[in-house]
Image: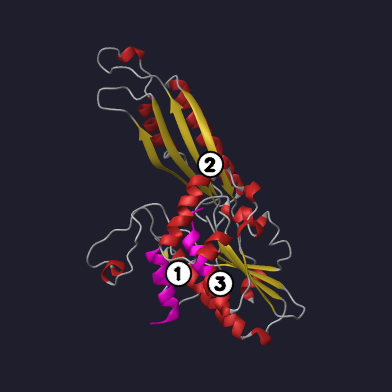
Amino acid sequence: MNQLVQYRREFHYFPDIGWREFRTSARIAEILTEMGYDVVMGPELIDEKSIGEPERLDANTVRAEMNRAIQQGANPSFVEQTKGLPGVMAVLDSGRLGPVTAFRFDIDALPYPEKGEEGFRPFDEGYFSSSPNAVHACGHDGHVAIGLGTAEKLLTRKDELCGKIKFFFQLAEESFYGAQSIVDKGHLDDATNFIALHIGLSADSKPLPSHTIACRCRDFVSDRQLDVYFKGKVAHPCGAAQEGKNALLAACSAALNIHSIAPHEEGLCRVNVGEIHAGLCANTIAPEAMMRVEYRGQNENISDYLGRRVMAIIKGTAAAYELEYRIVDYGEVPAVESDDEMMQR
């Protein structure tokens, strides 16, 4: 079997969600070291001050996740080298003057189970996710395999290269602080070129054929996520309904209104309420509710427009239902356009 296929299936079988990619990172570091690379991990790669509080894990959780990685066969030495901070960087220095080119490969999985049924290839061929709470549904297992293959191939052609090539195996791409924690450490300060990839893209709303590489990728939209908490008042829905303040209904109302936000004239905009958690039981007015909101825009104007509309809806809904509200803002990844000159090359 092709080595890249083996890599991809291994990482698919052992998925790690963001900030918990200890087995993934240790295995990447082990493979790169066997190739002849020196690896950078842990605090040397990640700026801890850049980790936002919503995603910061406590010490006990970090230790438990590191132990899990070891139990799943990860090399303990490389697990410990993370010092509780996943991710890996390796550098190929040609020894000759030239540009610094950075390659980014994301490594995290998504936090839900993979379906297991006959006819589903990972299930049929034995590399179905071993985790009940994680799955590589966004293709990052493939990205890791491509990254390792790229690092190996370029190392064999070192004598033909100039400058430096940095390989970043980035943690927590599905969240907001993984990339920032690497950027803030200064590892990209000297980069002349930056190249990232994603498998499974489409063109004109049609999937690209297999074995096709597209270089002219555009319209990578911004992304912002919020957790919204409504706090009301519990009451019996029959005996004392007038005393209750229903947080569940407020969250439902807000969700419907958020999905009714009008499009923006300048381009693509998307909103989504992906989760709502509320309620105690059938005969109780729900005193609390949480909903998770995401919005995306093609440019800064659109993103700002969506932010204003979402905030107005949340504030107005809380007022209408006489509730308190609190927002946890995970931050924003801005929209970006690929460089025309670099794409032409």
Question: Which mark is first along the chain, 1 or 2?
Answer: 2
Q: Nearer the viewer, residue 110 or 88?
A: 88
Across and down, in percent, residue 151 comes to 57, 76
Q: Give the Cα distance between marks 1 and 3.
A: 18 Å
Q: Amino acid at mark 1?
A: Gly
Q: Dots 2 and 1: beta carbons under 8 Å?
A: no
Question: Which mark is first along the chain, 3 or 2?
Answer: 2
Q: Which quarter of the figure is the C terminus placed in?
A: bottom right
- Residue 41, can we see it? yes
Q: Give the magenta-colored segment's residue range.
A: 1-28
Question: Which mark is first along the chain, 3 or 1?
Answer: 1
The mark found on residue 142 in the picture is 1
Are there few (<14), some (14-19), or many (20+) residues within 10 Å of tag 1? many
Q: Dots 1 and 3: beta carbons under 8 Å?
A: no
Residue found at the very far left of the displayed protein: 118
**Local secondary structure at mark 2:** helix
User: Which residue is located at x 38 percent, y 23 percent?
Assistant: 287
Q: Is 11 left, or right, of 101 in this rendering?
A: left
Across and down, in percent, residue 30 comes to 53, 71
Q: Which quarter of the figure is the N terminus placed in?
A: bottom left
**Local secondary structure at mark 3:** loop
Q: Amino acid at mark 3?
A: Cys
Are there few (<14), some (14-19), or many (20+) residues within 10 Å of tag 3? few
- Residue occupied by mark 3: 215
Q: Dots 2 and 3: beta carbons under 8 Å?
A: no
Q: Quadrant of residue 40?
A: bottom right
Foreground mark, 2 or 3?
Answer: 2
Q: Is residue 224 above or below residue 291?
A: below
Q: Quadrant of residue 153?
A: bottom right
Foreground mark, 2 or 1?
Answer: 2
